[in-house]
Image (cartoon, helix red, strand yellow):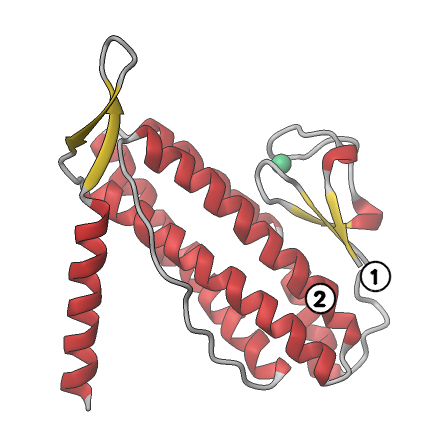
């Protein structure tokens, strides 16, 4: 069983790497041409980060549906806003990946749905790993590779994720105690960097990227 899983993982990695090997670059005349791009560790890191954000977005959307089924409507805007933030991360990271000559495509990820409390606990764990291990390692690699666009995009995502820790903590407390009265009724997501606020505490402009509050999308 374990052997099979390992084999499948290796096949998946191979197929994925093969997908990422194609690249479109503009020559000095501005013509687009298909060329081979040497993949750096940062290409791989960005692919991982993008795929992970895509999986997270699918999970958050599925978990929102589950919260609705479980009659936990207070958790719905949280999951929806988090799904939207992940989509913004995908576009930031994909932009950096494109600048580096990368191109990728992948299928819709499979999502396992459990109870809302279990779903939330999974995301707390995943996010902790992203903040403490994955993104710091990706950023270090990007620095070593001199991949400035990747560094900026990865740092932006990491910073947004650090800044929303209080939202996770509040949701965690509410789920543990069963008292949802202190949870935000609405969350607002920055369309440029994905930073998410309790809509009541939304500043005039995004603390991370300066986007004005009128451009934010609210989930309630
Ligand atoms: Zn922003």
209 on left or right of 146? right
Instruction: Specify few, some or many for label 2: CA neighbours under 10 Å numbering under 14, 14-19, or 20 or more.
Output: some
Q: Does residue 19 show up?
A: yes
Secondary element at image label 2: helix
> Which image quarter holds the C terminus?
bottom right
Q: Is residue 191 above or below residue 68?
A: above
Q: Give the x, y percent position of residue 92.
A: 47, 38
SS category of the residue bearing label 1: loop
Q: Is residue 11 above or below residue 194?
A: below
Q: Position of residue 19 (x, y in %)?
A: 22, 50
Q: Earlier in the sequence, mark 1 or mark 2?
A: 2
Q: Nearer the viewer, mark 1 or mark 2?
A: 1
Number of numbered labels in the structure image: 2
Which residue: 23% across, 35% down? 23
Residue assigned mark 2: 170
Quadrant for residue 217, please give it.
top right
Measuring 28% from the left and 31% from the top, which residue is drawn there? 100
**What separation in Å lies between label 1 and label 2 (alpha carbons)?**
12 Å
Residue at 37% across, 52% down: 49
Q: Is 186 positioned to the left or the right of 67 in the image?
A: right
Give the class, few, some or many, for how many residues have Cα within 10 Å of label 1's Cα (few <14, many ≥20): some
Q: x%, y% of residue 21?
A: 18, 44
Extreme residue in the bottom direction: 1
Q: Which residue has dot 1 on it? A: 185
């Amino acid at each position: 069983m374990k052997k099979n899983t390992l084999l499948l993982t290796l096949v998946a990695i191979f197929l994925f790497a093969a997908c990422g090997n194609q690249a479109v670059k503009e020559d000095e005349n501005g013509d687009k041409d298909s060329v081979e791009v040497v993949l750096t560790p940062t290409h791989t890191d960005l692919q991982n980060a993008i795929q992970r954000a895509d999986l997270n977005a699918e999970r958050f959307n599925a978990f929102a549906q589950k919260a609705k089924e479980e009659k936990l409507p207070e958790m719905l805007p949280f999951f929806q806003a988090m799904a939207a933030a992940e989509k913004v991360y995908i576009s930031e990271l994909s932009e950096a990946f494109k600048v580096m000559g990368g191109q990728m495509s992948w299928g819709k990820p499979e999502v396992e749905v459990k109870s809302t409390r279990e779903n939330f606990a999974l995301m707390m764990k995943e996010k902790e790993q992203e903040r403490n291990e994955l993104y710091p390692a990706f950023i270090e690699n990007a620095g070593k590779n001199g991949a400035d666009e990747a560094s900026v995009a990865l740092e932006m995502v990491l910073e947004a994720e650090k800044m929303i820790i209080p939202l996770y903590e509040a949701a965690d407390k509410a789920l543990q105690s069963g008292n949802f009265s202190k949870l935000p009724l609405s969350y607002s997501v920055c369309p440029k960097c994905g930073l998410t606020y309790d809509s009541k505490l939304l500043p005039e402009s995004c603390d991370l990227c300066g986007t004005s509050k009128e451009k934010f999308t609210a989930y309630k």
